[in-house]
Structures are given as C-alpha cells and as structure tokens.
Image (cartoon, rainbow, N blue to C red):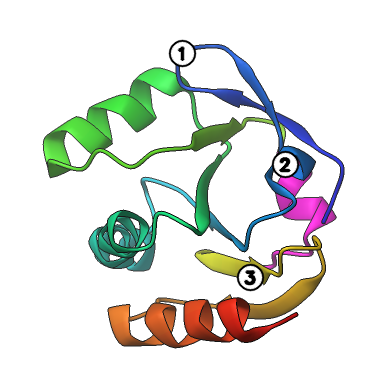
Amino acid sequence: MPALTLQQLDGGAVALDGFKGHPLVVNLWATWCPPCRREMPALVAAQVANPDVAFVFVNTGEDAATVQRYLSDAGLAPQNVLLDRTRAAARAMDAVGYPTTLFYDRHGMLAGRHMGELSRAAVDEQVARLRAAH
C-alpha cells in the first residue's frame, strides 16, 4: 500500500497506511466519470454492509465543494472520502483510467485490482476473498 496522506472533505488528513490491520478497498474516482457515478451506490452499500472492511473513496483531481455537491445531489453519504487534487494516489497506484478499485489485505498487500465499473456482486466477491486471506 502506498505511503500517502490525503485530505478529507473537512480538511483533515488521513494516511492510507493507517488502515493496515483491516482489509481495505480503495476506489479512485471522479464526479465527471459516468462509470464512477454508476458504481458509487454499490460501493457505498458494500461499505455499510461490511463494517469490518475499510472502504476509501479517493476523488481524483477535484475540490471538496465539487465532491460534496455531487454526493449530496446523489443522496450518498460514504465514509472515508478523500481528495487527491494532485493525482498522487492515482500515480502511486498505477491507475490509468477511472474508476480503478484496489483491494488490499489486512497486511497492506495488494490482493486485487479492477479497472472499470464494478457491480455489487463483484465487490462482494472481492471482499470475501480479502476476508479469507491470511
């Protein structure tokens, strides 16, 4: 897992490696990305259904007001929405398109990667694999 610290919507900072010890799903997305917008409700539902798994939503290149407006208009309230204004996370995670979702085991090791829109079933399958990993 990259050693990155990103900004929260409220201005605070969060280090990604602070999530070690738990399975982690990192979704790189943008409000202007139609597949990102379509998959977001499934990811938020998976976050709610799996409190033992950390989900982090890293918005790429946009400001807090834009992200907050999108989430509010869409009726979504995900936890752990982070801002990557400089695209440092996207570069560190080798994201060549959006959405890109990365799955890390509890030790911070990359266990899976998916570029493109994910269904809820695909998210659930990846989460089950993370839980099964030792």
* Quarter that holds the C terminus: bottom right
Image height of 120 relative to 62, above or below: below
Q: x, y percentage for residue 17?
A: 78, 43
Q: Give the structural element (helix, strand or loop) at label 3.
A: strand
* Residue annotated with mark 1: 10
CB-based contact (under 8 Å), mark 3 and mark 2? no
Residue, x 37% and y 49% (percent of image)?
A: 32
In-image side of 134 versus 42 (left or right): right
Q: Nearer the viewer, mark 2 or mark 1?
A: 2
Tell me whether circle 3 and circle 1 mark residues in contact (CB < 8 Å).
no
Location of the N terminus by quadrant is bottom right
- Which residue: 61% across, 85% down? 132
Amino acid type, mark 2:
Leu
Estimate the spatial distance between the alpha carbons at disc 2 and disc 1, rounded to whole Å. 17 Å
Is residue 97 at least partly visible in the picture?
no
Task: Give neighbour class at mark 2: few <14, some 14-19, many 20+ (Cα, 10 Å).
Answer: some
Mark 3: which amino acid?
Answer: Phe
Q: Residue at x 72, y 63 (%)?
A: 106
Instruction: Give the residues drawn in magenta, as a range.
Output: 87-97
The answer to which of marks 2 and 1 sits earlier in the sequence is 1
In the foreground, 89 or 15? 15
- Give the image quarter of residue 43: bottom left
Q: Which mark is residue 16?
A: 2
Residue at image location 40% in from the left, 76% down from the top: 117
Query: Which residue bears the numbered disc 3?
Result: 103
For mark 1, give the secondary structure.
loop
C-alpha span from label 3 to label 1: 25 Å
Q: Is residue 91 magenta?
A: yes
Looking at the rendered structure, the kind of residue marked 1 is: Asp
